[in-house]
Amino acid sequence: FGPLSARVRGLLVKHTRTGNPLVDSVAEHQPASSRAYMQYMGHLLFIAPVGLNICFWHFTNASTFLVLYAFISYYFSSKMVRFIILLGPGMSALGGIAVGHGLSWSFKQFLEVPEKNSVPPVLKKNKKGSLVRVKYENGVQNKKENEDIIFFKKVMAGLFFFLLYQLGPKFYHRCHNMARALSNPSIMYKAQTSKGDVIIVDDYREAYWWLKANTPEDARILAWWDYGYQIAGIANRTTIADGNTWNHEHIALLARALTHTEEEGYRVSRHLADYILIWGGGGGDDLAKSPHLARIANSVYRDMCPGDPTCRSFGYVDRQRTPSPMMEASMLYKLHSHGSKPGVEADPNKFSHVFDSKYG
């Protein structure tokens, strides 16, 4: 057996300690936050713990499985946010147990009639300190107190029904809204402009269709691996890397081409591909990801950032997104900001600008 991979090590240690910047740079490999749990679990965050306690009180083979599943799935989701999906079935089952027991108990308070003589006589001490058998009329010790308890239970049962009536429809709509949101294609989505206008961002699909319609069938596309599957599946073109590229050195070479100087990036990329696809538009675009790319490149090619393992010299130097000298000289920065920032242009002897999407 070989050593554990960086992805497996990420489940056992903090995500910043895997030693592999490629794994550490992926958003899905970060630990889940309380906000992520609230977003995906919603009301189950408060209901499932009740079901977990019920499983402890009614210990069976089935409840043992649920308890183990809940703890193991929670552990893995706390290490990587992508594993929250594993937590969903367990949370749903535990939430169902809590609601089911609550419904069963609440119905009993209204449907079951308390029997007389339900409270047996008890032994009490008299003034002399000896135990005597105390008898109650009709077998009930303080009838008024017993009726108060029954009334209180009915109030609690009514409160449970009221909460279920109020929160049930909200939970139902939340689940369906979340299902629709997760089912939408990731390459086409709604967004808001700086003026507040709601738009449909269709840039990904437009770019892939442009590649399919305007490039030779054997064309090779150089883009960061995030877009590899989409380029292959929608544009039907060969991509340099995708999510199934396990060769760390291969990904590092791609990162080196993008984050090194324009001259060096061109020297490498001209042997790998015919076209380069860069995503812009701000937010989480390629330039925002580029510090991670530089660290990945430096993990194999140490001449990228000599004496600086985390490549801190590559990135923004202030909150106004002013690039560092190393970022400003990179091929990625030149291609990303070509024609959109004053004084920034890609070398026309090396690159031809062939397509711009509407928003990106």
Image (cartoon, rainbow, N blue to C red):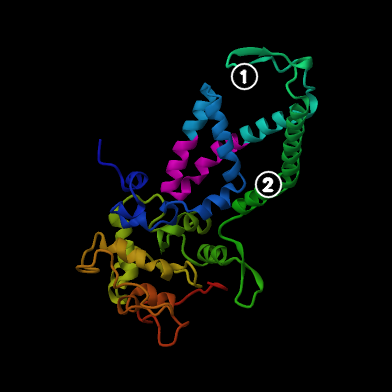
Left/right of residue 290 with respect to residue 54 in the rendered view: left
Within 10 Å of the Cα at label 2, are there few (<14), some (14-19), or many (20+) other Cα atoms?
Answer: some
Viewer-proximal residue among 215 and 180: 180
Mark closer to the chain start, 2 or 1: 1
Which span of residues is magenta-colored? 70-95
Viewer-proximal residue among 135 and 128: 128
Left/right of residue 169 with respect to residue 191 in the rendered view: right
Q: Secondary structure at mark 2?
A: helix
Question: Which image quarter: residue 105?
Answer: top right
Position of the N terminus by quadrant: top left
- Residue 332 percent location from the top left of the image: 38, 72
Viewer-proximal residue among 337 and 137: 137
Q: Amino acid at mark 1?
A: Lys
Left/right of residue 359 with respect to residue 290 in the rendered view: right
Within 10 Å of the Cα at label 1, are there few (<14), some (14-19), or many (20+) other Cα atoms?
Answer: few
Compared with 305, 328 (above or below) is below
Q: Which residue is label 2 attached to? A: 171
Q: Residue at x 38, y 82 (%)?
A: 348
Q: Which residue is label 1 attached to? A: 127
Q: Is residue 135 magenta?
A: no
Q: Is residue 277 visible?
A: no
Compared with 216, 31 (above or below) is above
